[in-house]
Image (cartoon, rainbow, N blue to C red):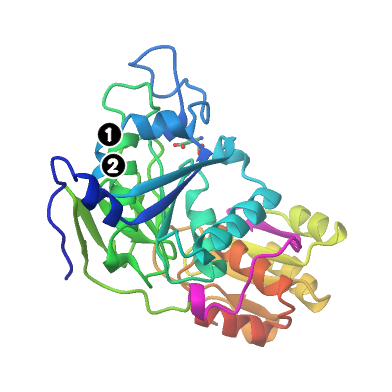
Amino acid sequence: MTTSSSYPVSPGPSATLALPRIAVLATGGTIAGAAADVTNTSGYQAGVVGVDQLLSAVPALSTVARIAPEQIASIDSKDMALPLWTTVAQRVNTLLAADDVDGVVITHGTDTLEETAYLLHLTVKSDKPVVLTAAMRPASALSADGPLNLLNAVTVAAHAAARGQGVLVAFNNRIHSARDVVKTSTYAVDAFQSPEIGALGWVQDGRVDIQRAVVRAHTLTSEFSIGTAWPAVEIVASYAGVSRVAVDALVAAGVRGIVVAGTGNGSIHQALQQALAEAASRGVAVVRSSRVGSGHVMRNGAAADDALGFVSAGALNPYKTRVLLMLALAAGVTGAAALQKVFDTY
Ligand code: ASP
C-alpha cells in the first residue's frame, strides 16, 4: 500500500534536518546482550549493552531519522515488573505529547515483549508511531539480528504509514500489531508470528509496506490509561489431572481476577471449573483464554459462561488477557457482562 525508497547513501545536511525525530527507549533484553564468545547465543547476559552502543552499531540510522536515545531500564525482560510498565508507558506518553518527537522505538527483551506491546497499545494516547523491537541473538554474536531489527524499527517509526496503526512490533522484517503478535520460538531468529491473522506488513531495505489495518480499539480510541494501581490478576492452566489448589490459594490471597489458560476452546477441567465458579460467585473476575496458541475462545463455546459467571477472551492469549483484565479492573469495570464487552472491543 505505502512504500518509500531505499536508504540514501548520505542524507546531506538539509535532508538530515527534514528527517523524522525518533526517541529510542532502551529497556535491555538480548538485543543488548553480551557473551564472552561470538558463537555463544544462549549463555549470555541480557541488558548489558547501552543504548549509545546499540545505536553506534547501525550507522545507517542517521539516514532514516534524528535519534534521541534514552536508557530507561537494563533488564532481562523475563523480570519485567508492573512499576516499570508504568514508567515506560508514562514516558512514551510524555515523549509523544512533545511537538519535537515524531515517534518512539522501544528496544526490549523478546520474553515479555508481546505483553509490554499490548499494554502500550491500550494506554498510549497518541497516533504517532510506537514500534517495539528485540533480538534473538545477543549483540556480541555472529550474525546478530538486533542491528537490522533496530534499523527496521526506526524505519517503520519514521514512516507515515505507521501512524494511527496502534503499537507495532518490527521483527525479522515483518511488522506486527501489538494485539496479534506472540513469541513462537525459543531460539529461532524468526521468533514472532501473528497466528491466524498474520503480520500487518513488512519492512526491508528502507521500504515499508503495511497491507492491512487493526480494527479493534487502541491508543486514542482506548478507554484505558496507564496508572500506578495494578489489580492482582494471576494465570492458571487447565491440564490432565489438575487440582483446584492453585485457584483456592489465589482466592485466599485476595486476587481480583484469574485468567485460565484453558484447553482447546478455553475448556476447563471440571475440578478447576468448580473452583473457578465459586471464585466468580465471590466477585473474582474469571476470564477463559486458551493454551493452544492460535484460534479464539468462543463465549459459551466450551463452558456455560452465562451460568458460571465467566468471560471469554476471544483471540487474546492468556498473557495479553491478563494485561487487558488488569487495565479494565483498574478502570473500575466489574461484572462478567461489562468485562465481556471489554474483551469484545479490544
Ligand atoms: N531473556 C531475554 C529477554 O527477554 C530474551 C530475549 O530478549 O530474547 O530479555
Compared with 103, 58 (above or below) is above
Position in image of residue 218 (x %, y %): 48, 74
| Image side of residue 343 versus residue 276, left or right | left
- Find out whether residue 226 is within the magenta segment: yes
Is residue 291 on the magenta stretch? no
Circle 1 sits in a helix, a strand or a loop, which is it?
Answer: helix
Give the magenta part as a residue range: 218-241
Image coords of residue 251 (percent x, y)? 82, 62
Q: Is residue 320 above or below residue 341?
A: above
Mark 2: few/some/many CA within 10 Å (<14, 14-19, 20+): some
Disc 1: which residue:
59
Cβ atoms at labels 1 and 2 below 8 Å apart: yes
Mark 1 to mark 2 CA distance (whole Å): 6 Å
Residue 263 showing in the rendered view: no
Main SS category, magenta section: loop
> Relative to 177, is 7 above or below?
above
- Quadrant of the snapshot with the N terminus: bottom left
Q: Position of residue 176 (x, y in %)?
A: 34, 59
Observer-nearest of 151 and 238: 151
Q: Position of residue 199 (x, y in %)?
A: 29, 61
Disc 1 residue type (three-letter): Pro
Looking at this rendering, what residue extends furthest in the top direction?
36
Q: Which mark is residue 171?
A: none
Whether residue 87 can be seen here: yes
Query: Does mark 1 have its CB less than 8 Å from ligand 1?
Result: no
Which residue is labeled 2 in the image?
Answer: 62
Give the residue type that dot 2 points to. Answer: Ser
Q: Residue at x 48, y 69 (%)?
A: 265
Q: Residue at x 38, y 54 (%)?
A: 21
